[in-house]
Image (cartoon, rainbow, N blue to C red):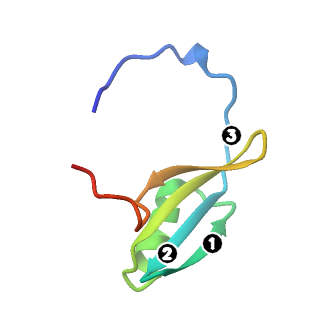
């Protein structure tokens, strides 16, 4: 991990109220949800951890820029190799 100081003037856009996508995994299947209007990302994480029977999940921020994209915030896809 590397931490460097930044100049905040280099950013070009910001989204004040993002939507999130949460993918819950169990075996080879998954359930996907979109969360809109959440007070904060912490609220979404709390929901994911408390309401879905301990299934592993991946949390994304939904980004609508040049099409729909997902920015991973937490978790790992089951098919990914573990980190070293």
Task: Say whether residue 1 is left or right of residue 46.
Answer: left
* 3D distance between C-alphas at marks 3 and 1: 20 Å
Residue at 41%, 73% in the rendered image: 49
* 3D distance between C-alphas at marks 2 and 1: 8 Å
- Dot 3, crowdedness within 10 Å: few (<14), some or many (≥20)? few
- Sequence-wise, the earlier of marks 3 and 2 is 3
Percent across and percent down for residue 1 are 27, 33
Q: Are marks 2 and 1 in contact (CB under 8 Å)?
A: yes
Q: Which residue is mark 2?
A: 24
Give the answer, above or below, for where 33 lies relative to 80. Answer: below
Percent across and percent down for residue 72 are 51, 51
| Quadrant in the picture for residue 55 | bottom left
| Quadrant in the picture for residue 3 | top left
Percent across and percent down for residue 37 are 68, 60
Percent across and percent down for residue 63 are 68, 46
Give the answer, above or below, for where 21 lies relative to 30. Answer: above
Secondary structure at badge 3 equals loop
- Sequence-wise, the earlier of marks 3 and 1 is 3
Q: Which residue is mark 3?
A: 15
Give the answer, above or below, for where 23 lies relative to 66. Answer: below
Secondary structure at badge 2 equals strand
- Sequence-wise, the earlier of marks 2 and 1 is 2
Residue at 54%, 18% in the rendered image: 8
Secondary structure at badge 1 equals strand
- As drawn, the label of residue 33 is 1
- Dot 1, crowdedness within 10 Å: few (<14), some or many (≥20)? few
**Residue at the extreme bottom of the image, as rendered:** 53
Report the number of numbered marks.
3
Residue at 62%, 22% in the rendered image: 11
């Amino acid at each position: 991990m590397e931490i460097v100081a930044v100049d905040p003037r280099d950013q070009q856009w910001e989204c004040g109220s993002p939507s999130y996508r949460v993918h819950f995994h169990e075996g080879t299947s998954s359930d996907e949800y979109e969360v809109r209007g959440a007070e904060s990302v912490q609220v979404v994480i709390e929901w994911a951890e408390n309401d879905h029977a301990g299934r592993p999940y991946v949390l994304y921020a939904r980004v609508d820029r040049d099409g729909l994209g997902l920015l991973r915030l937490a978790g790992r896809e089951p098919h990914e190799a573990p980190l070293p």
